[in-house]
Each structure stands twice: as structure tokens, then as C-alpha cells.
Image: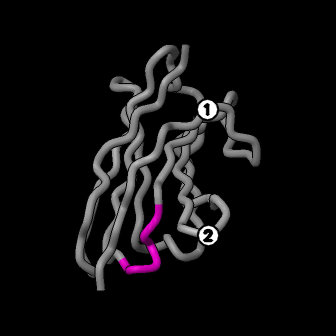
């Protein structure tokens, strides 16, 4: 049974930083793409960042230059370093894992989410 467990969320002031972690269990994801999504109150879940099996990275426009996604295959873990946080970044952040090496539209596994709140 695959499980994705996020941690690292919390309350931070605007301009601050947080690092989210997602540990996968149940199978190895070293060659699979993984990513981060977020859902703000009243909005649809949206893609934030992804890293494919070859470690190429992808970001939504609002995250470019502020967020960095990385992975540690030995620990079966993906990270999201978030800097220069803004109140608009407030959302529940979800870890995602894909069945293949590419970051595609369909996510196969979801974490339970971790709350990120940025105060102004």
C-alpha cells in the first residue's frame, strides 16, 4: 500500500520560508515523477511544482524563482523549499506521485496534505 506523508507546513510571515517534505512508503519512487499541488479555500487544486525521473523540474508561474523542488531517492523523499512566501501562497499543500517518470496531468497517489498559512 502506497503512502505519501507530508510535513513541514505551518504559519509564517510574508517574506519567510518553509520547507515541505514528503516521504513515500510502500514502493520505490526513484524513477517516478513526483510533485506538489496546493488548494486554497474556495479554489481548485492546482499544480505547483514537479520533478521527473530524470530530475528535470517544472513550476507554475507564481512559484518560479521562489520555490525549489528536489528529491532524495535514497530516502524516497521529495522536498519543496518555499522562499519569499506571500499571503497568496496560503493553501493546503499536497504531495503527488505519478506512475511513470513524467510529470503528467494524472496523479496516481496523493498525500493527506499539510497546511501552509502566510500572514501579511
User: In the drawing, does residue 24 fall left or right of residue 101?
Assistant: left
Q: Vertical placement of 8 versus 112: above or below?
A: below
Q: Vertical placement of 104 versus 1: above or below?
A: below
Residue 60, percent from left and from top: 59, 67
Residue 6, percent from left and from top: 38, 40
Residue 40, percent from left and from top: 53, 67
Q: Secondary structure at mark 2?
A: loop
Front residue (pair 115, 73) = 115
At label 1, counting other C-alpha atoms closer than 10 Å, the crowd grade (few under 14, some 14-19, many 20 or more) is: some
**Residue at numbered disc 2:** 42
User: In the drawing, does residue 95 fall left or right of residue 117?
Assistant: right
The quadrant of the rendering that contains the N terminus is top right
Residue 38, percent from left and from top: 54, 58
**Residue at numbered disc 1:** 109
Q: Report the coloring of the rendering.
A: one colour
Question: Which quadrant of the figure has residue 103?
Answer: top right
At label 2, counting other C-alpha atoms closer than 10 Å, the crowd grade (few under 14, some 14-19, many 20 or more) is: few
Label placed on residue 15: none
Range covered by the magenta-colored residues: 86-91
User: In the drawing, does residue 93 fall left or right of residue 59?
Assistant: left
Which residue appears at 46% of the width and 79% of the height? 88
Q: Earlier in the sequence, mark 2 or mark 1?
A: 2
Mark 2 vs mark 1, CA separation in Å:
23 Å
Q: Secondary structure at mark 1?
A: strand
Mark 2 in CB contact with mark 1 (< 8 angstroms): no
Amino acid at each position: 500500500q502506497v503512502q505519501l506523508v507530508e510535513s513541514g507546513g505551518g504559519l509564517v510571515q510574508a517574506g519567510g520560508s518553509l520547507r515541505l517534505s514528503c516521504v513515500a512508503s510502500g514502493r520505490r519512487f526513484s524513477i517516478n515523477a513526483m510533485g506538489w499541488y496546493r488548494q486554497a479555500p474556495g479554489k481548485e487544486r492546482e499544480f505547483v511544482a514537479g520533478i521527473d525521473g530524470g530530475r528535470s523540474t517544472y513550476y507554475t508561474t507564481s512559484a518560479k524563482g521562489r520555490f525549489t523542488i528536489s528529491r532524495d531517492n535514497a530516502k524516497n523523499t521529495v522536498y519543496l523549499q518555499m522562499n519569499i512566501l506571500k499571503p497568496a501562497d496560503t493553501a493546503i499543500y499536497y504531495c503527488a506521485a505519478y506512475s511513470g517518470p513524467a510529470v503528467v496531468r494524472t496523479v496516481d497517489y496523493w498525500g493527506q496534505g499539510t497546511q501552509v498559512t502566510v500572514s501579511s
